[in-house]
Image (cartoon, rainbow, N blue to C red):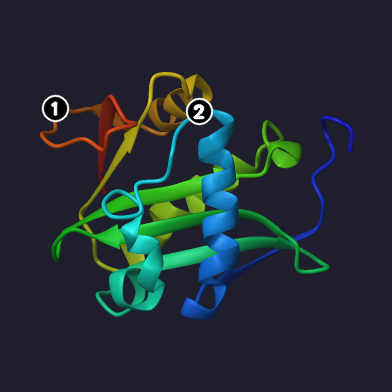
Amino acid sequence: MNSSFLPEIRIRAATNKDTERIKALVFGVLAEYGWKPGQRSTDSDLDDIEGNYLRPGGLFELIEDKEGKLLGTVGLYPLDRDVCELRKMYFIPEIRNKGLGKRILERMIESARRRGFKRIELETASVLEAAAHLYTSYGFKPMERDGLAPRCDKAFYLDL
């Protein structure tokens, strides 16, 4: 793939049947940065996508190519009635830096609004400079947050 080519994609809601594929992608991206999955903490939400994301009013989506290959993941995890957290927005290396992050972030902001959330929060790591730049370009502001995930050192919010 050249740097400007983005394959034809489809986006669909994840179910618990997708758990192993989701974990493989997410944990693979974490490994790129030398991070280990927090299966008993930070990443335990992936053990039950339907119970942790969908039933409480959130969302978890898969980005696939036309053959069904998993290219990325993204979720809106409800923290309470008004606030959700953008989680697990990860893409395979071949499709990064091609505009998909912008497209997916816009989709998640709109999805959060439609679901009645008033605020989106997220955590990220300084090493993910492009991600932090993307978030701030959409109006996300830095925030102080206790109990950041071990691999994260920054938090942002966007009031909707």
Q: Amino acid at mark 2?
A: Gly
At 26% from the left and 31% from the top, the residue drawn is 155
The residues tagged by marks 2 and 1 sit, at their Cα atoms, a distance apart of 25 Å
Q: In the displayed image of the protein, which residue is found farthest to the right? A: 1
User: Which disc, if any, is residue 34?
Assistant: 2
Coordinates of residue 49 in the picture (x, y in percent): 39, 71
Give above or below for 145 relative to 25. above
Q: Contact (CB < 8 A) between labels 2 and 1?
A: no
Does dot 1 land on a helix, a strand or a loop? loop
Q: In the displayed image of the protein, which residue is found farthest to the left? A: 146
Can see residue 100?
Answer: yes
Dividing the picture into quarters, in which one does residue 28 lie?
top right
At 42% from the left and 25% from the top, the residue drawn is 132
Give above or below for 96 relative to 15. above
Coordinates of residue 66 in the picture (x, y in percent): 81, 66
Does dot 2 land on a helix, a strand or a loop? loop
Q: Nearer the viewer, residue 125 or 56?
A: 125
Tell me the residue that label 1 is attached to.
144
Mark 2 nearby-residue class (10 Å; few <14, some 14–19, many ≥20): few
Q: Amino acid at mark 1?
A: Glu
Coordinates of residue 107 in the picture (x, y in percent): 50, 55
User: Left or right: where does residue 42 sit relative to residue 59?
Assistant: left
Give above or below for 34 relative to 30. above
Quarter of the picture containing the N terminus is top right
At 52% from the left and 65% from the top, the residue drawn is 61
Q: Nearer the viewer, residue 42 or 134?
A: 42
User: Left or right: where does residue 98 sit relative to residue 41?
Assistant: right
At 35% from the left and 49% from the top, the residue drawn is 86
Q: Nearer the viewer, residue 18 or 134?
A: 18
